[in-house]
Amino acid sequence: MKKTFDDLFNEFIHNDESDSPLKRSDIKKTIETIANFKKFKKGEISEENVYKELGDPTTTEEYIDNGLKYVRLIWDTPQGQFIKVVVSDILPEEVPLEKQLALAVEKEDYPKAIEIRDEIKKRAEKK
């Protein structure tokens, strides 16, 4: 007979002799951490509150893809990793004009492409 997820979970939680590397105390800490985030009222789960609960991230990664900037914050906790991804538009000064032009053409935003092309020409004439 196949067991359901609930059956397996309950069996694990109530088994003192579990072979799993996770102990009840670890699970309890994870549940408490999650519960702490739920205590915040809507709109109050802010970066400040996350830092207050978890401290500074263990790792921060930044990358740009399809005109968006991604910042991935990773906290290593005893219960595993907590990951927060912040997505934002790329500020124009962060992307070279040539790359902006290629993105505008790729998106078929020709009025924007013309504007960027003209800006590239204007800057080249100033040099």
Image: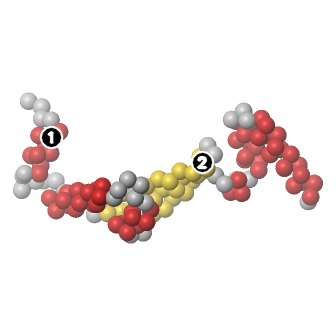
SS state under label 1: helix
What is the crowding at mark 2: few (fewer than 14 residues within 10 Å), some, or many (at least 20)?
A: few
Q: For the view shown, which residue lies furthest in the right direction?
A: 125
| Residue at (11% x, 51% y) in the render | 13
In the displayed structure, would residue 25 be above or below residue 2? below
Left-right relation of 65 to 15? right
Mark number displayed over residue 6: 1
The answer to whether residue 83 shows anywhere in this view is: no
The answer to whether residue 2 shows anywhere in this view is: yes
Query: Residue flagged by tag 2: what amino acid is it?
Result: Leu
Q: Position of residue 46 (x, y in %)?
A: 43, 60
| Residue at (68% x, 57% y) in the render | 94
Q: Nearer the viewer, residue 99 or 50?
A: 50
Q: Position of residue 48 (x, y in %)?
A: 43, 66
Pick the quarter of the image with the C terminus.
bottom right
Left-right relation of 126 to 86? right
SS state under label 2: strand
Which residue is labeled 2 in the image?
68
Q: Position of residue 126 (x, y in %)?
A: 92, 58
Q: CA distance from mark 1 to mark 2?
A: 40 Å
